[in-house]
Every structure is written in C-alpha cells, then in structure tokens.
Amino acid sequence: MRILVLGSGATGGYYGARLLAAGRDVTFLVRPRSAQQFAENGLRVVSPNGDLFIEHPPTVLPLDVREPYDLILLSCKAFDLDAAMDSLAPAIGPNSLIIPMLNGMAHMGALDARFGKEHVLGGVCFISATRDADGTIRHLNDLAEILFGDRYVPTSPELQAVQSALADANFKATLRPDIQQRMWDKWAFLATAAGMTSLMRASLGDIAAVDPTISLRLFAECTAISTAEGYPPAEQVREREAGRLSQLGSTFTASMMRDIESGAPVEAQHVLGDLLAYGRKHGLSTPLLEVALTHVRCYEERRKRSWVPDGRRMQ
C-alpha cells in the first residue's frame, strides 16, 4: 500500500517515521523548505518508545505529485486545511482513502465536499509531541495511537487493508466502527484541556492543585454539547478523562498553550469556537468555554498586531 503523509510536523513526522521504520512504502508531501531540511538533516525521532533516525526520508513536492496514493494520512493545522486540500488533489484516485488527523469536526465537511465522502474516513490520533527547529521530533510521553473507521460502513476489505498497513509500526492503530463517537470524545477532552491550560498558562496538575473542580466544570460543558449532538461519552470515558483533568502532579499541557507561549498561530475556532457554536445551537449555558474562546481570540488579535516575519514571536 502506497502511503502519503501530508505534514512533516510533530504528528505527521512521528507516524510517518514509524511507518517507514516498519518497512512501509511512505512518502512525505512537503513544502520546499521541509524537503530541504529532510535532505540536510534526515528525520530524527526522540521517543520513550525508542529513538530512530531516517537519513533520507522520501519526499514529494505538491507540484510533483503525478499519481494517486492508496492511503493519505492528513496531518495539518486547521488553518492550513484549504492549502492542504489543494496539494492533495492530484494524489486522490478512485480508490484513495484519507485518514484526517485534525481536531474538531469542521474539517470533515470540507474534505467531503472536496473529495467525496467515499474517500474520507473518520480519524483521530493521540500523541503529545513537538518539533525542534532542526526538525527533530520529540515525543513527550509513550502515548501514540491512531483510531480510524468508515463513518457509514463498519468494516470492509479496504478498511482491513488499511489496518494491516498501519499495524506493527510501534504505535497503536485501531479500526473503530464507532469512529464518530471517538472523534467527539476526543474533541470534548481536547477543548477542555486546550481551553483550560491556555487560559491559566499552567499544566492540568497545577490547575487542579489550585482549583480541583474548574477543569471538570469546563469538561461538563463540553460533554453536554457532545451529548446534545447525539454523542454522549460512555461513563468509563467520562471517568477516565475526568481523572486526567484532575490529576495532581500532571504536567500535561495542550499544544494550543505551547503554541501561544511560542507566539505561533492557534486553532481557536476549530477547537473552541466550533464547539461553542454547537452549544449555542442547543441553547446550552457554557460560560467557561466562552471565556476560554475569548481569551484565545484575544491572543490571536494581539498576534496580528505584533506579527514578525518568523511568524512566531510577539512584542
């Protein structure tokens, strides 16, 4: 199976590197700057699950895609989705399947409209990783998992082929017939963690030490929205995520907070704003979610005013 990974950042780089190391036919769809960095530095992963170095990872530029790929792992930020879809278009053939690893749900409609629902699987990934200036990917814990599935057909030979392509690559890959539920479950947790750690500029453990209930109150708002949309989290999921959100000593911070601290762009609308819109549609009271979104949008306004050419620092 020919696999195309769009995104050479921490997420796409990590999963693509693991698949390459497992002997899969993987190519990275990258911009010229990333292609040059790969050529000069290779692809290095530092991880509790084992370090690896790939000297010459295969790459292709968007203008050089000439034929379709069987499987596309789409890993980009929401604000880059339109450009990503333009780059992907030549890679989509009659049998191509896309696993999007974005947060939230809005990207699904955009991908369906551009490529057709038959090509777009549901997908969600779990990983905490960063990418250094030299391209080194640093995996921050031992969690690395991809869930995927067809939103309409529980299983098929094509899905089993995808499962085989992703298996035994030093990360967990699971075919889920309830993939939309899993996507909503992650969204509710991520919106809580991103909103709260960004708002407080602190880890979940630090927040819990000061106020043991505030993260749980935001989580209750987010799960009320998913429930109203028809995707209530199972009790065991609710308990697990509540435990993570209130764990004393936890050093977990969402990537949104880390992006804010480094002056990078953030996914305020995709992670927080879209969820709030669902809540308003159902007439739900979500005061903490509203404050979290307002806070991050204020950061975005300040960043517009203070942007400098490297796109990361603010005055």
Image: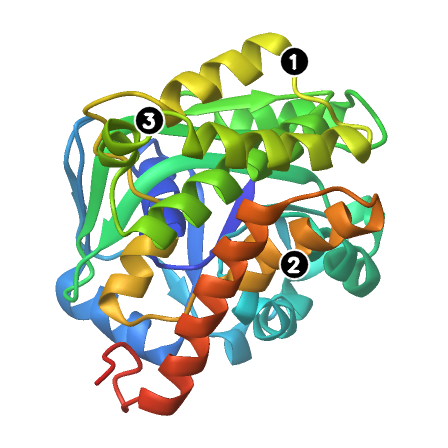
Q: Residue at x 18, y 34 (%)?
A: 47
Q: Amino acid at mark 3?
A: Leu
> Which type of secondary structure does the marked residue at label 2 adopt?
loop
Picture disc at residue 68? 2
Instruction: Give the x, y percent position of residue 203.
Output: 25, 39
Q: Which residue is mark 3?
A: 143
| Mark 1 or 3, nearer chain start | 3
Q: Residue at x 77, y 20 (%)?
A: 155
Vertical placement of residue 166 versus 264, above or below = above
Q: Residue at x 62, y 58 (%)?
A: 273
Q: Residue at x 38, y 81 (%)?
A: 302
How was the colour assigned to the protein in this rendering?
rainbow
Quarter of the rendering occupied by the C terminus:
bottom left
> Crowding at label 1, few (<14), some or many (≥20) Cα neighbours within 10 Å?
few
Pair 2/3: label in front? 3
Quarter of the rendering occupied by the N terminus:
top right
299 left or right, relative to 231: left
Question: Hey, which quadrant is residue 171 in on the image?
Answer: top left
Mark 2–mark 3 distance (CA, rounded to whole Å):
31 Å
Question: Hey, which quadrant is residue 148 in on the image?
Answer: top right
> Which type of secondary structure does the marked residue at label 1 adopt?
loop
Q: Which residue is mark 1?
A: 234
Front-most of residues 133 and 192: 192
Instruction: Give the x, y percent position of residue 267.
Output: 50, 61
Mark 1–mark 3 distance (CA, rounded to whole Å):
21 Å
Pair 1/3: label in front? 1
Vertical placement of residue 173 versus 72, above or below = above
Please give the count of numbered marks on the rendered protein.
Answer: 3
294 left or right, relative to 71: left
